[in-house]
Amino acid sequence: MKQLALGLILLTLLLTACSSNQRLNPQSQPLSKPNHSSMYFYMAGNLQFLDGYYDNAWALYQRALNHDKSSAQIKKEMLMSAMYHHLQQPTADVDKIKGLVEANKSFIRSDEELLDAAYSFYSTLKDTLSQRQILEEMLKLHPSARAHVLSFIFNYSTRGKPDSSLLRPALDYIQNDAKQLQYLGSMFEAVDPIFSLKAAQRLYEIEPNEANVTNFARLYLTTRSTETDYDFFDRLSYPDDKQLMHYILDASLAFESWDFLNRAALKILDTDDNQLIYCATAGALVARNTDFFTKLEASFTPDASRESGYISSLIIANSFLSKSAKDLTPLLDSISNSTDMENIIRFYTLAYASDLPEELVPWDSVCSELINLLTQSLPQSPKREYLIAAAAAITDLSAEAEARYNQAKEQLIKRFMQQELYDKDDLAWLLQQYYYSDRKEERIPILRTAIREFPDSAVWYNDLGYTLLITDGDLDEAGELIFKALSMEPQNNFYLDSIAWYFYLKKDYQQALSYIEPVMEMEDMPAEIAYHIGLIHMRLGDFDTATHYMKYASERSDEDPEHADKAKRSLEIWGN
């Protein structure tokens, strides 16, 4: 399997290698051009060649060469078309083309493109001796990245094992060609990860975009094998290299390179940058790096950033792990969303899971101990109750435990809202809970708050508008809200359905139809939308379409029993 994957990578690189590789010895003389008498056949041959009719091109170039036997350009194109003809139709004119190539070996060796075509020609013939000779000529007379890649492929195919030393010179010829560095780096990764890392580093230096820095960080973490490999990171300078430092640290979290994170921890702590410190703190937690936490707690000041919340959660989790008697109230007070609260539990359990395979961790005793610590260390509050409920729900999968968790989370979010602390994910969770528990009226003030705090969220304009429609609210306000959502996402099928339903309730059925028509081909259509389509078409007298969509809605009782039941009643009224 590994060899097959490598073969695919090699083939990709071979087919896409650029023709602009730099040469050490450029051609000394340009090829002589066709004369007037041969120009007609030459141009006709060019057209056939460009259209892929290489046999026709070959014949036309031969005729052009009869008119101008001294033209090296015509001779080159004639040989190229002959070899391409063979590559296109391997069984056609084999002996004739082989004789032509053999007779012009000395001419072919003077041109890089001809040598490349000759190599492919001999490859199809499985003539390894001639392939080897061609490669030697390419490397000697026209050295390039492609020549070294072909040399590597040939050696691999004949000896059965990769020799990465044959690939290394290709990096010198590619230099700053970003596309070729990317392809070559992919090949290196399969046979020589260290050189793949070098290619990735050069690619990042040329084009420091997110994709390239992510790839470099990934390779840096996965190819590191000795302590000296840390030296590269140690040479990075903050803030100039902040982006690269962050991606390497982020990759180290993804690959659980805790040793690397701990080695980098103190350097990162000196930056006072919470975006970087968060990564180092996670590593310190897993490694139980008490020195790091002592220095961090002495210097850390919480702020409004997401990373600050992570760091607070990590410090609190570490305090529970170390059974510290430190007063955690200031840190807990700095946390303003349920995600960071629950992260305390996640980070606490992460430390245990990193010590043992997850299936061997005694989760019942771990969670029981944590609940005791929470009960003893924290004063009673919505935060404490939420942490206890979240810890209990890890091992208790009963419906009762889930209900306690949901209730505790709802009370926690409401407490944040009373303190005018609004988190987008918290509001979304609360709105979803109210939706599924059919608390439509209670959703309205929360939706107004969500729109006020996060005015760029189209979904909440539509949600509030549609909620007003189905709770006998102000139709005009509902229409304005839904149109606002549509101005942000004009192709959204759910928003189009909402505005269609608005016009239906306004008894403007033609307008309703104009908005619902684009939705009618929607895949996995919800029963509620199908029900709306059915009613709109019924009002317009299109009973066939109305019946079709009502039947569809009536069959969706598992996903939406309310609208499936409404659809069934409509069909009964219509006599279906």
Image (spheres, helix red, strand yellow):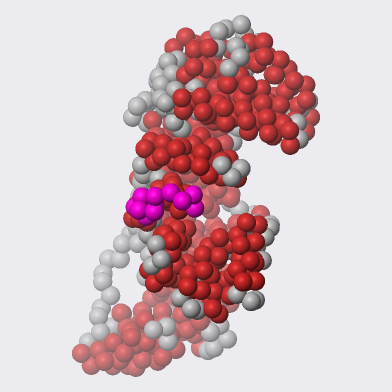
Visible in this render: residue 392? yes
| Residue depicted at 25% across the width and 84% down the height | 34
| Residue depicted at 44% across the width and 67% down the height | 516
For the residue pair 462 and 249, the one nearer the viewer reads as 462
| Residue depicted at 54% across the width and 78% down the height | 543
For the residue pair 352 and 464, the one nearer the viewer reads as 464
In the image, is residue 497 part of the stretch drawn in magenta? no
In the image, is residue 472 part of the stretch drawn in magenta? yes
For the residue pair 529 and 90, the one nearer the viewer reads as 529
State whether the magenta stretch is mostly helix, strand or loop: helix
Q: Is residue 88 above or below residue 552?
A: below
Q: Position of residue 422 (x, y in %)?
A: 44, 31
- The quarter of the picture where residue 361 lies is top right
- The quarter of the picture where residue 243 lies is top left
Q: Is residue 147 left or right of residue 553?
A: left
Q: Is residue 242 left or right of residue 561?
A: left
> Which residue extends farthest top?
325
Q: Which residues are magenta?
A: 470-480
Visible in this render: residue 225? no
Q: Is residue 391 left or right of residue 245?
A: right
Q: Which quarter of the rendering shows the C terminus? A: bottom right
Q: Position of residue 491 (x, y in %)?
A: 41, 61
| Residue depicted at 61% across the width and 62% down the height | 566
> Which residue extends farthest front?
573
- The quarter of the picture where residue 378 lies is top right
Q: Which quarter of the rendering shows the N terminus? A: bottom right
Q: Is residue 225 above or below residue 508?
A: above
For the residue pair 132 and 455, the one nearer the viewer reads as 455
Q: Is residue 399 left or right of residue 559?
A: right
Q: Position of residue 405 (x, y in %)?
A: 65, 30
Q: Position of residue 326 (x, y in %)?
A: 57, 7
Q: How many marks?
A: 0
